[in-house]
Amino acid sequence: MKLSHSVSGALRTFSYFMASGTHYYLEDIDYLSLYGENPSEVEMAYAIFANVLEFDAQGEVTNEDHATLRATQYIRHFLDRSYQVEPPFAGWETALH
């Protein structure tokens, strides 16, 4: 089974904004340096995005904004320890498969 266009589109959109340094949830936060200096933090953000992303029986994404928010909260907290993630991440959200 292939990913639906909805799922691949959500992944593509998330990737674009993460790689361009223009993600709206990370406005005014310089996170592009993570790609060269802390790639495991980028890996975790993608894992969170993928773990949280949900789609229906037709393959249509149902919570893209929430998956994006959770992934960017991880990056924001990593770069600004005063930022508190609410609610805290559950183990299933940060699992590396």
Image: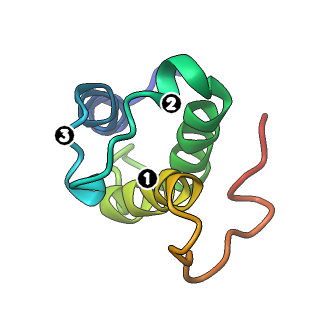
Label 1, secondary structure: give it: loop
Q: How many badges with numbers are in the image? A: 3
The reply to whether the C-beta atoms of the residues labelled 3 and 1 are less than 8 Å apart is: no
- Specify few, some or many for label 2: CA neighbours under 10 Å numbering under 14, 14-19, or 20 or more: some
Q: Position of residue 72 (x, y in %)?
A: 43, 54
Circle on res. 22: 3
User: For this view, does 56 lie left or right of residue 21?
Assistant: right
Q: CA distance from mark 3 to mark 1?
A: 25 Å
Q: Quadrant of the C terminus?
A: top right
3D distance between C-alphas at marks 1 and 2 = 29 Å
Distance (Cα) linking label 3 and label 2: 14 Å
* Three-letter code, disc 1: Phe
Label 1: few (<14), some (14–19) or many (≥20) C-alpha neighbours in 10 Å: some
Dot 2: what SS?
helix
Q: Is 12 placed left or right of 55 in the picture?
A: left
| Residue ID at (35%, 61%) | 62
* Residue nearer the viewer, 96 or 4: 96
**3 or 1: tag closer to the N-terminus:** 3
Q: Nearer the viewer, mark 3 or mark 1?
A: 3
Q: Going from the N terminus, do you reach mark 1 or mark 2 first? A: 2
Residue 65 in view here: yes
Q: Circle 2 sits on which residue?
A: 34
Seen in the picture, residue 75 relative to 19 is either above or below; the reply is below
- Report if residue 56 is visible in the image: no
Q: Which residue is located at x 62 percent, y 49 percent?
A: 51
Q: Is residue 82 above or below residue 18?
A: below
The residue that mark 1 highlights is 55
For label 3, the SS is loop
Instruction: Tell me the crowding category of disc 3: few under 14, some 14 to 19, or many 20 or more residues within 10 angstroms, Cα based.
Output: some
Q: Residue at x 44, y 27 (%)?
A: 33
For discs 1 and 2, the disc positioned in front in the rendered view: 2
